[in-house]
Structures are given as C-alpha cells and as structure tokens.
Image (cartoon, helix red, strand yellow):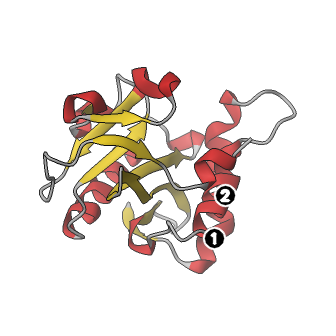
Amino acid sequence: MLIRRELPADVDAIAEVHRSAFAPLTPPGSEPVEAGLVAALRASSAWIPALSLVAEDRDGTVAGHVVATRGTIESAPALGLGPLGVRPDLQRTGVGAALMHAVLGAADALDESVVVLLGHLDYYPRFGFVPAADLGIAPDVAEWAPHFQARALTAHRPGVRGVFRYAPPFYEIG
C-alpha cells in the first residue's frame, strides 16, 4: 500500500470511496454527505493540499482517503480531521490506520499544533486522541462534546484553548 497526496485524477475515486464507506450509515435512498463534504472542502479556503491523502492498493486503485482542513480555536489555527473513508472490502485491514498515521505525521511536519475530530471513542484514542476538553478545547455545537476529540502535535501550545470551529463546509452539509 502507498499513502500519497491526492492528485486531480483521484477526485472521482475519492468520492466513490466515501460513498461506499458511508453508505451503510446512510438512510436508504440517500447519498452519504461525506463525498459532497470533501468536494466542498476542496473548493474552500480551508483546503490544505498536503493534508488530503489517499491510500493506493497494489493495483494503484484508491482504497481510502483522509483529509484535514483549516479550522480555528478562537482565532488560533487548528486542524479539523475528516472525513476518513476506506473502501468496504478493505475496512479493518489497516488502511484507515495507515492513513491516520500519515495525516498526523504530515500535519506535524507542517508545524500544525492540534488536530480535532468528531469520532468513535473506541477507534481514535489509539492515535493519541483524547477528549478535547482535556486540552481545553470545546466544540461550538454542544451536542458534539461526547465524541469531540483532539490530538496535540509537537508544535502544540497549551495556552491555546477555547472553542473550535470547523471549516464552513462542515456546517453546510445536509
């Protein structure tokens, strides 16, 4: 498996990865919002090309995708992670973990300070995520608090505390 930056030729394959990965969680007859969210993020000023990564399988086919985009804690820059999607036939094979390690390493290399996400409490702690409140970070939507997690990176400044806001497309998804 190869983890690399997204290329323009990957756009359709990335959308399909997210459609197939999130279809089981989507009401019948509805389109998963994640594919549209990635497209909206890509078109926004929050997009950071170096933090949109794909996993290729042995045949060079896109097997998974992860993205982190610009968000803020009060006025300080931070990253919002997601979505993370893996083709259903390759879920639970390490593709998602490889993407997580790669995006966190890339964010750290870019001197980002912290990554936040809304996610499963049994999955993300293995990558160093803790309840965001432990780092003094709160979501701007109170209902998110139980699943709101953060990961401090090398450049983390403990004094940066407050309310996190995702990139605008996160609030526009249906």
- Count neighbours of disc 2 (C-alpha within 10 A) and say few if under 14, some if 14 to 19, many if 20 or more: many
Where residue 93 sits, quadrant-wise, is top left
Is 11 situated left or right of 52 in this image? right
- Count neighbours of disc 1 (C-alpha within 10 A) and say few if under 14, some if 14 to 19, many if 20 or more: few
Label at residue 43: 1
In the rendered structure, which amino acid carries the disc numbered 2?
Ala
Q: Nearer the viewer, residue 50 or 101?
A: 50
Is 146 situated left or right of 150 in this image? right
In the rendered structure, which amino acid carries the disc numbered 1?
Ala
Q: Residue at x 62, y 78 (%)?
A: 9
Where residue 49 sits, quadrant-wise, is bottom left
Asked whether residue 93 is in view, the answer is: no
Which percent across, then down, holds residue 36?
Answer: 70, 54
Q: Nearer the viewer, residue 168 or 109?
A: 168
Q: Of the residues tagged 1 and 2, which is closer to the observer?
A: 1
Q: Residue at x 20, y 68 (%)?
A: 109
Vertical arrangement, residue 49 with respect to residue 34, above or below: below
From this viewpoint, which residue is outermost toward the right? 29
Mark 2: secondary structure: helix
Label at residue 15: 2
Image quadrant occupied by the C terminus: top right
Q: Nearer the viewer, residue 68 or 156?
A: 156
Which percent across, then down, holds residue 156?
Answer: 15, 53
Give the mark, 1 or 2, whose residue is nearer the N terminus.
2
Which percent across, then down, holds residue 108?
Answer: 21, 61
